[in-house]
Amino acid sequence: FMGGQQKEDLTLEFWSHQDYQRVRQNLHSTISRGRATIGNNVVVYRDDLYCINPDIDIWCDAHRFEKYIRDARGKPSRDVRTQELWRRALALYQGDFLPGFDSLWVIEERERLRELALEAMIGSGDCAQAQADFGGVVIQYQQALKLNEFREDVHRATRAGHLPSRRHRSR
């Protein structure tokens, strides 16, 4: 889903330690097995790139996760629709992307998705704060701190979330 990839990049990523003939065999057999598993028309070779066939409609949790976050950004925290977008995004986030893999592109994507999850947790906490759901504030901000314990702004917001603001206390 990162766009097309050249043969050379794929072979370097997965078989950089093997000789050319072996790498070529590995690439072709891997693509063949992949096509047998998911369908012959899903992975295509176009313009010297292997890619997901753009003519196929594919549902991907990571793409939907990102869409919910994009849709929630900039919307008012008091709007229950905003809270629902953050909630849907967080429901799709199941933890780190490809844990145990250490390729550079995997690490970068893992960090990017983690930052988006952090944004969704903070956004959800902000919505809870705007709706005077102080228990929800603390839960969301504490979840955010599990992803990044060094976020001082989240520590402050968590402490502030324990007590309603003066405006809410005077009611």
Image (tube, grey):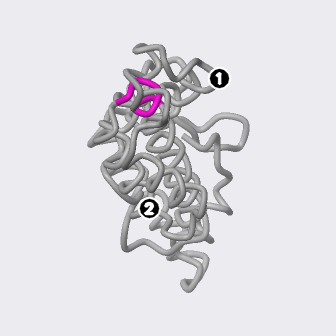
- x and y percentages locating residue 68 in the rendered image: 48, 26
Q: Mostly what secondary structure, the magenta segment?
A: helix
Amino acid carrying mark 2 in the image:
Leu
Tell me if residue 127 can be seen.
yes
Q: Which residue corresponds to the image point at 34% horizontal and 56% vertical from the top-left?
A: 95
Q: Which residue is at the front of the view, 169 or 96?
A: 169
Q: Is residue 71 rendered to the left or right of residue 170? A: right
Amino acid carrying mark 1 in the image:
Gly
- x and y percentages locating residue 8 in the rendered image: 68, 62
- The residue at the far right in this view is 47
Q: Secondary structure at mark 1?
A: loop
Q: Is there CB contact under 8 Å for labels 1 and 2?
A: no
On residue 145, the disc is 2
Q: Which numbered disc, 1 or 2, marks the residue that appears first in the sequence?
A: 1
Tell me if residue 41 can be seen.
no
Neighbourhood count class around disc 2 (C-alpha, 10 Å): few under 14, some 14–19, many 20 upward: some
Q: Which residue corresponds to the image point at 60% horizontal and 44% vertical from the top-left?
A: 2
- x and y percentages locating residue 162 in the rendered image: 37, 49
Q: Which residue corresponds to the image point at 36% horizontal and 44% vertical from the top-left?
A: 93
Q: Which residue is mark 1?
A: 74
